[in-house]
Amino acid sequence: SVSPGYVKTEILEANFKASGLSQPPDMKGLLDKFPSLQSEDVADSVLYVLATPRHVQVHELIIKPVGEPF
């Protein structure tokens, strides 16, 4: 499995819209203060796992942005 830390995507905004709720106005500013991965970072890690030789098993890959507090 690939387990990323905080990834900066539009998923939170989309979830709020889908649920009919409005995103708290200060949430985006708060989340922008956290170190984050980009979606390309996660995609690159998946490509790495897929590119390993057939005799290699990757059971878990945890990737986090440097400085992530949680």
Image (cartoon, grey):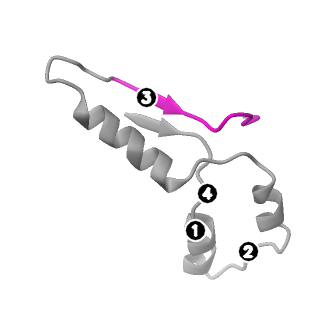
- Characterize the magenta stretch by its predominant secondary structure: loop
Q: Residue at x 63, y 74 (%)?
A: 16
- N-terminal-most mark, 4 or 2: 4
> Does the magenta run of residues contain 44?
no
- The amino acid marked with disc number 3 is Leu
Quarter of the rendering occupied by the N terminus: top left
Residue beneath label 2, please?
23
Q: Nearer the viewer, residue 67 or 6?
A: 67
Q: CA distance from mark 2 to mark 3?
A: 31 Å
Along the line of sight, the residue nearer the viewer: 53 or 14: 53
Of labels 2 and 3, earlier in sequence is 2
Asked if the magenta segment contains residue 66, the reply would be: yes
Residue denoted by label 3: 61
Question: For the magenta stretch, what is the residue range?
Answer: 59-69
| Mark 2 residue element | loop
Q: Nearer the viewer, mark 4 or mark 2?
A: 4
Residue at the outermost left position: 54
SS label for mark 4: loop
| Residue 70 drawn above or below residue 36 | above
Q: Is residue 28 left or right of residue 41?
A: right
